[in-house]
Each structure stands twice: as structure tokens, then as C-alpha cells.
Amino acid sequence: MPKRKILIVDDEERLCRMIKLNLEETGQYEVQVETKGKQALATIRAVQPDLVLLDVVMPEVSGFDIAREIQSDQLLQKIPFAFLTAAGMADAAKQAQSKGLGSVPFLAKPISVEELLKHIEKYASKSPMSR
């Protein structure tokens, strides 16, 4: 069975490395990292991940803006994503709703490997690869 492709879009390089190492250690995932928000869409197009873990607050462009682009792009809109945030979950969820993103999963940083794996299995199951 092929490994699921996970893309992490987050400007915190240390966090990205930790998540990447932990996920790849399971042998079930191939993980790519993009630390530049402005490059996120190009990387998503190139990688065609089964799930994007998207930071909400980044310097160049917000995760909400990237999510809107994903949802409006016919080639990308079937790729599921979940937000990673250190901000208040309720406030972030309200912001997402106000930006027209609908009901999107939010994962609180820091997140344990076990919790992350549980969420990846839940959200990545909606990916084109698993259909």
C-alpha cells in the first residue's frame, strides 16, 4: 500500500521537522514541508498531498487565505486540509467561518504524535488517494 502524502505548511521550521520525523517514522507517510506561505499553493500543486496541515498565522500570507485558494481551485479543492494553530481555537474557528471556509478541522499546537495520527487518519480518509 502506498504511503499517504502529507504536506505541512507552517513557518515554524523546528515544529515542521519534528512532525515530519514522527510521521515518517511510522512508515505510513511521506511528509513534505513548506515554510513559505507564498509558496504553499505551488507546493500543493506539485505534491498533490492526501492532506495539508496548514498553520493559521504566518508572516506572508495567512492560512485562511491559502485555504480559500485551495477551495476555489478546481484542481486542489478535493484535497482536504486541517488548520494547526496556537491561537484560541474558538476564535480561529469563528474567523474561518467569517471568511467563508465552512467547517474546517482545527488542531491545537502543540499536538501529540498520537493525537496527530488520529486526526490524519480521520481527515486524510477523504482524500482522492483513499477513494
Image (cartoon, helix red, strand yellow):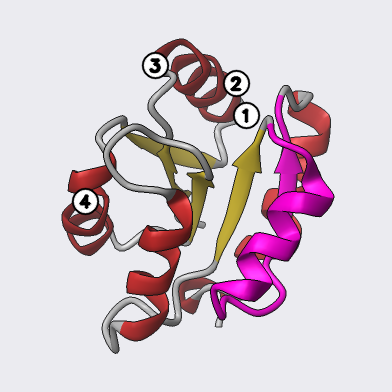
Asked which secondary structure carries label 1, the reply is loop
Asked if the residue at tag 4 contacts the one at tag 3, i.e. Cβ–Cβ closer than 8 Å, the answer is no
The picture places residue 123, in percent across and down from the top left corner, at 68, 63
Instruction: Name the residue carrying label 3.
Output: 13
Number of callouts in the render?
4
The picture places residue 125, in percent across and down from the top left corner, at 66, 69
In the displayed structure, 17 sits above or below 101; it is above
Q: Is residue 105 visible?
A: no
Q: At 25% across and 34% down in the image, what residue appears? A: 36
Is 129 left or right of 38, judged from the image as shown? right
Mark 3 or 2, nearer chain start: 3
What distance separates the C-alpha of mark 3 from that of mark 2?
14 Å
Q: At 49% across and 38% down in the image, what residue appears? A: 57
Q: Which mark is residue 43?
A: 4
Where does the C terminus fall, quadrant-wise? bottom right
Asked if the residue at tag 4 contacts the one at tag 1, i.e. Cβ–Cβ closer than 8 Å, the answer is no
Magenta stretch bounds: 87-109
Instruction: Name the residue carrying label 2.
Output: 22
Asked which secondary structure carries label 3, the reply is helix
Is 130 left or right of 41, judged from the image as shown? right
In the displayed structure, 45 sits above or below 8; it is below
Q: At 38% across and 26% down in the image, what residue appears? A: 11
Is 57 left or right of 9, judged from the image as shown? right
Asked which secondary structure carries label 2, the reply is helix
Mark 4 or 2, nearer chain start: 2
Asked if the residue at tag 2 contacts the one at tag 1, i.e. Cβ–Cβ closer than 8 Å, the answer is yes
Mark 1 or 4, nearer chain start: 1
